[in-house]
Image (spheres, grey):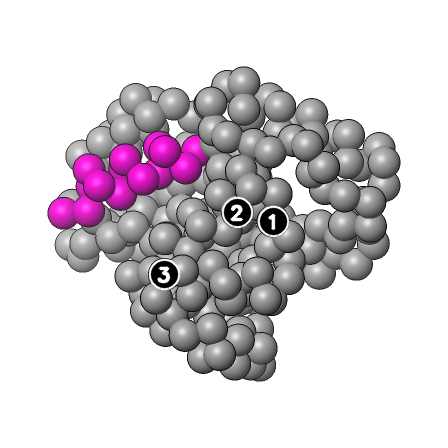
C-alpha cells in the first residue's frame, strides 16, 4: 500500500479556511510522518471581474465576524473590502502554485502569509506586487516570483488545481479527503474542530 495522502482543498481568500488555519497546521505537524499532506487550491471566486456590491460586502463581512467569533482568528474589519474591490481569488491561488514550482516547502507558508495579509492586515492580495512582497518575505526573489507568476505554465497549473477540486466533488472549503491508493475517503467539510477532524483521519487510516 502506498503512503496515504491527506488532500487539503482550500482557498487563501476563504475566511473559513483562515479560521481553520490553526487546525491544519496542527494536523500537518502531527501526521507528517504517517501521510503526505498536499494543498489543492480550490478556486473560491477565480476570474471574478465585477467589483463587490454593497450587499455583497456586507454578506462577506458577516461571515468574517462569524469566523472571528468562532475561531478567534484575527481580522482587520476597519476599511476592509474597500469600494471597487474585485474579489478575484485566482491571483492569490496562482501565487501559491508559483511558489510550489520554486520551492515546494514554501507552499503552506505562503498560503498562510497570504491569509494573514488579507484578513489580519487588510492588504490587497489580488495584486501581483503584494504577492511578490509576501514571497520575498519567505526568501524568494521577487523578480523570479513575478516572472513565474505571469507565465502560461503557472496559469495552466492553477487551472489544473481548480479542475482537481471539481473532479473530487468538492463544493465548499475547507475540505479534507484522505486518499488510500485509488480510494478517496471524505474526512471533513467546513471549519471543524481539531478533535473531530483528528478522529475522522484516524478512522480513515485504520480502514
Task: Identify the mark nearer the N-term, 1 or 3.
Answer: 1
* Residue labelled with disc 1: 123
- Residue 137: image quadrant is bottom left
Position of 32 relative to 95 (above/below): above
Secondary element at tag 2: helix
Image point 50% across, 30% down: which residue? 74
Give the label on residue 117, or none.
2
Residue 140 pos. (x, y %): 38, 70
Query: Is 39 situated left or right of 25 in this image?
Result: right
Q: Which residue bears the numbered disc 3?
A: 138
Find out whether the residues at labels 2 and 1 contact each other: C-beta distance under 8 Å.
Answer: yes
Q: Quadrant of residue 185?
A: top left
Rounded to the nearest whole Å, what is the CA distance between mark 3 and mark 2?
13 Å
Determine whether the residue tagged by mark 1 lies in a helix, strand or loop: loop
Residue 86 makes an appearance in the image = yes
Region rendered in magenta: 20-33
C-alpha distance separating marks 1 and 3: 17 Å
Locate residue 81, reporting x and y percent.
Answer: 72, 42
Please give left or right for residue 194 compared with residue 12 in the image. Answer: left
Give the alpha-carbon distance from disc 2 to disc 1, as whole Å: 5 Å
Residue 105 found in image quarter: bottom left
Most extreme residue toward the top, as rendered? 69
Split into 4 quadrants, where in the image is the C terminus? Answer: top left
The outermost residue toward the right is 54
Sort mark 1 into few (<14), some (14-19) or many (20+) by Cα contacts within 10 Å: some
Amino acid at each position: 500500500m502506498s503512503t496515504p495522502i491527506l488532500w487539503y482543498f482550500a482557498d487563501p481568500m476563504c475566511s473559513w479556511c483562515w479560521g481553520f488555519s490553526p487546525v491544519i497546521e496542527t494536523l500537518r505537524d502531527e501526521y507528517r510522518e504517517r501521510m503526505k499532506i498536499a494543498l489543492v487550491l480550490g478556486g473560491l471566486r477565480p476570474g471574478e471581474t465585477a467589483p463587490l456590491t454593497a450587499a455583497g460586502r456586507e454578506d462577506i463581512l458577516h461571515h468574517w465576524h462569524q469566523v472571528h467569533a468562532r475561531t478567534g482568528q484575527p481580522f482587520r474589519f476597519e476599511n476592509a473590502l474597500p469600494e471597487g474591490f474585485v474579489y478575484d481569488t485566482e491571483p492569490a491561488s496562482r501565487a501559491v502554485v508559483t511558489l510550489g514550482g520554486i520551492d515546494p516547502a514554501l507552499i503552506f507558508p505562503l498560503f498562510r502569509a497570504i491569509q494573514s495579509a488579507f484578513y489580519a492586515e487588510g492588504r490587497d492580495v489580488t495584486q501581483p506586487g503584494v504577492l511578490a512582497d509576501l514571497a520575498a518575505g519567505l526568501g524568494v526573489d521577487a523578480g523570479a516570483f513575478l516572472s513565474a507568476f505571469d507565465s502560461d505554465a503557472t496559469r495552466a497549473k492553477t487551472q489544473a488545481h481548480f479542475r482537481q477540486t471539481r473532479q473530487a466533488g468538492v463544493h465548499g472549503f475547507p475540505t479534507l479527503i484522505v486518499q488510500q491508493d485509488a480510494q478517496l475517503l471524505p474526512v471533513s467539510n467546513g471549519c471543524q474542530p481539531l478533535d473531530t477532524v483528528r478522529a475522522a483521519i484516524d478512522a480513515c487510516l485504520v480502514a
